[in-house]
Image (cartoon, rainbow, N blue to C red):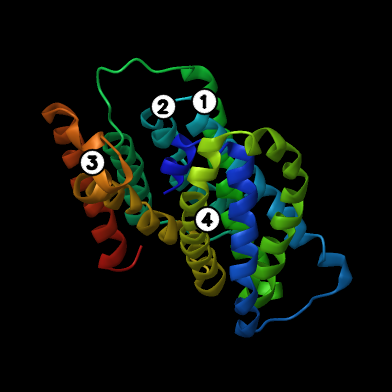
């Protein structure tokens, strides 16, 4: 849906703003999960977490907007490895051989799932840099949300961080004037709103699971299965959104099939038992 909205003229800034508004609104019921408001000396934590979430969004959307998806997405997949590393450094959680192996398999799988062999890629260096910054921002966000949720609880830190992210997005309205002059942008508005709702739902489910169960590394391996579902979705219903990726050649589809197998193997390793 967001890809379709982009094709119809929704730029990075408008997309970020609408997504963050939707996410903040959808996060409010999570207050019912309970939690505590710690000492004032820790009140800086949700706004700082929101900075990382917001920057991760912007870097990711810029990478996808400037360059090719098949270049940006594999680099973004490095987030899985970064989360495993940061979990050891910042939280002291042991990451066993099973989980490290699953993280490596997931990263390789994401690269293969986004194979688009034979196409020229635009602005490769810039795309890689932006995607790497996005991956690092999101990885650090995941780990500190896990660490700081001990003091706050899922029902406090998640809504406060998401509302902070929405506040940071308000200045992005200055870019809407140029956007409003394009007819295609108005055509893409329903796609943007629907995509923002889906983004909020999947994002909050993921973030809340980390703050509740304190397993950021495991969650990221499982979450990487979205790469597999996106390939299946493009093949099955991509034409509903005027997506033409289902017509890629047999070689590309074969590499993506290998990536799907590796990803499933990583998920099985995580679910099979102790790390």
Q: Residue furthest right?
A: 40
Q: Are marks 2 and 1 in contact (CB under 8 Å)?
A: no
Q: Assess disc 1: are there few (<14), some (14-19) or many (≥20) residues with their C-alpha within 10 Å of its C-alpha.
A: some
Q: CA distance from mark 2 to mark 1?
A: 7 Å
Q: Are marks 1 and 3 in contact (CB under 8 Å)?
A: no
Q: Earlier in the sequence, mark 2 or mark 3?
A: 2
Q: Which residue is mark 1?
A: 66
Q: Are marks 4 and 2 in contact (CB under 8 Å)?
A: no
Q: Which residue is mark 3?
A: 259
Q: Residue at x 44, y 35 (%)?
A: 7
Residues 4 and 41: in front is 4
Q: Which residue is mark 2?
A: 68
Report x, y in % for residue 29: 61, 78
* Element marked by disc 1: helix
Residues 224 and 182: in front is 182
Q: Which residue is mark 4?
A: 193
Report x, y in % for residue 124: 46, 19
Report x, y in % for residue 156: 69, 74
Q: Is residue 151 visible?
A: yes
Q: Are marks 1 and 4 in contact (CB under 8 Å)?
A: no
Placement of 127 over or under 223, stated as above or below? above
| Left or right side of 229 for 79 | right
Q: CA distance from mark 2 to mark 3?
A: 19 Å
Q: Is residue 262 visible?
A: no
């Amino acid at each position: 849906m967001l890809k379709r909205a982009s094709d119809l003229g929704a730029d990075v800034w408008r997309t970020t703003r609408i997504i963050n508004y939707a996410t903040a609104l959808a996060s409010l019921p999570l207050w019912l999960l309970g939690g505590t408001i710690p000492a004032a000396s820790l009140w800086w934590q949700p706004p700082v977490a929101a900075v990382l979430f917001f920057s991760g969004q912007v870097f990711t959307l810029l990478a996808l907007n400037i360059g090719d998806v098949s270049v940006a997405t594999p680099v973004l997949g490095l987030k899985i490895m970064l989360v495993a590393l940061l979990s050891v450094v910042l939280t002291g959680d042991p990451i066993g051989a099973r989980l490290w192996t699953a993280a490596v398999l997931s990263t390789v799988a994401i690269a293969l799932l986004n194979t688009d062999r034979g196409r020229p890629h635009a602005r490769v260096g810039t795309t890689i840099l932006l995607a790497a910054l996005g991956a690092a921002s999101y990885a650090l966000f995941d780990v500190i949300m896990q660490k700081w949720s001990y003091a706050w609880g899922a029902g406090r830190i998640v809504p406060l961080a998401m509302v902070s992210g929405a506040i940071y997005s308000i200045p992005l309205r200055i870019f809407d004037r140029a956007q409003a002059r394009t007819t295609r942008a108005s055509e893409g508005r329903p796609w943007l709103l629907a995509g923002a709702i889906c983004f909020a739902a999947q994002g909050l489910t993921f973030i809340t699971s980390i703050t509740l169960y304190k397993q950021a590394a495991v969650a990221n391996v499982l979450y990487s299965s979205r790469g597999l579902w996106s390939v299946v979705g493009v093949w099955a219903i991509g034409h509903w959104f005027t997506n033409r990726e289902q017509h890629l050649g047999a070689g590309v589809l074969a590499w993506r099939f290998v990536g799907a197998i590796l990803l499933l193997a990583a998920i099985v390793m995580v679910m099979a038992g102790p790390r």
